Amino acid sequence: MDAQNPKFKVRLGLFVIAGVTLFVLGIFIIGKQKNMFDPVFTLTSTFHDIGGLQVGNTVRFSGINVGTVDNIVIINDSTVKVDMLIKKDVQRFIKTDSNAGIGSEGIIGDKVIVLSQGGSANAKMVKSGQVIASSEPSNTDAIMASLQITSDNAAIASGEISEILMKINRGEGTLGKLIQDKSMAENIDATLKNLKSSTKGLDENMEAAKHNFLLRGYFKKKEKAAAKAKEEAKDKAAKAKKESENKAKDAKEAAEKKAKEAAKK
């Protein structure tokens, strides 16, 4: 293609303009995410374990992205310092008793720093470069390992249940024979019928014993005791009812008397 061709020059110009536009737009988007074009101030906090936090991760306050992680430095074998760039317009809301914690976007998402709102009404606004307290993040790896163990146990239990059901379907074991073997079911049914007939025979024997000359006095004595107890319960109920009615009558008369005395006054 001829480099002096006007169409080629126009296409080349459009390509360069589009490339520069995308480059500037990319810088603008990245700079906005990194707060390069907004007034910012710095905060610092220290942790024993940052749980995979990286430079450039988000800083949140009240669920809103307000800054980014600017720098991570290992101070010693048990302390890691994290520097944060925070938007200047939210500085007045962050107090000296605010707390920096490490969370995540979802279960396995990127780590984020979460700034608490502080609990004291008398706390002052934080200053640029101030060190605030921190709280250690939960160990996600330990949680995932625990979930994996639970999942494995559930899989083992599911396999054992499937094996038991297969044995039952094949008629193995007591429960399998009970379900699959008709003769065992018939034997159980016959046993229940025999038990029912035995119970009926026992009732008949008891009824015959009531009419027996030697045992007649015993059963009559029991019937009299039951009738006496029933009569006593009936008398107690009637007495209680009468006492309740008398109390209600006395209360009504007292109320009418008070009403009359009040009307006379």
Image (spheres, grey):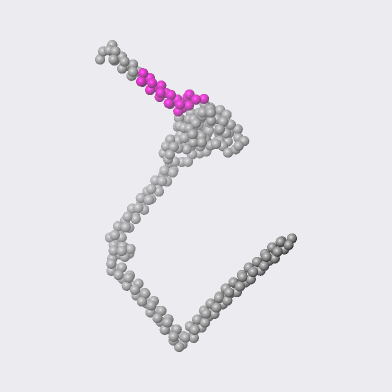
Q: Which residue lies furthest to the front in this view?
A: 264
- Front residue of 49/15: it is 15
Q: Position of residue 62 (x, y in %)?
A: 51, 36
Residue 143 to residue 202: above or below: above
Q: In which quarter of the image is the C terminus?
A: bottom right
The residue lying toward the viewer, choosing from 170 and 245, is: 245
- Identify the residue at the far bottom of this view: 213
Residue 99 in percent (x, y) is at 54, 36
Q: Which residue is drawn at 38% across and 50% down?
A: 153
Q: What are the residue bounds of the magenta stretch?
A: 17-39
Let me know if residue 47 appears in the view: no
Q: Which residue is drawn at 50% across and 81% down?
A: 223
Would you say residue 61 sits in the magenta stretch? no
Above-or-below relation of 64 to 227: above
Q: Give the quadrant of residue 243.
A: bottom right
Residue at x-position 29% and y-position 13%: 6
Residue furthest to the top in view is: 4
Q: Main secondary structure of the magenta part?
A: helix
User: Foreground: 148 or 202?
Assistant: 202
Does residue 265 sit above or below 199 in this rendering? above
| Residue at 44% across, 41% down | 140
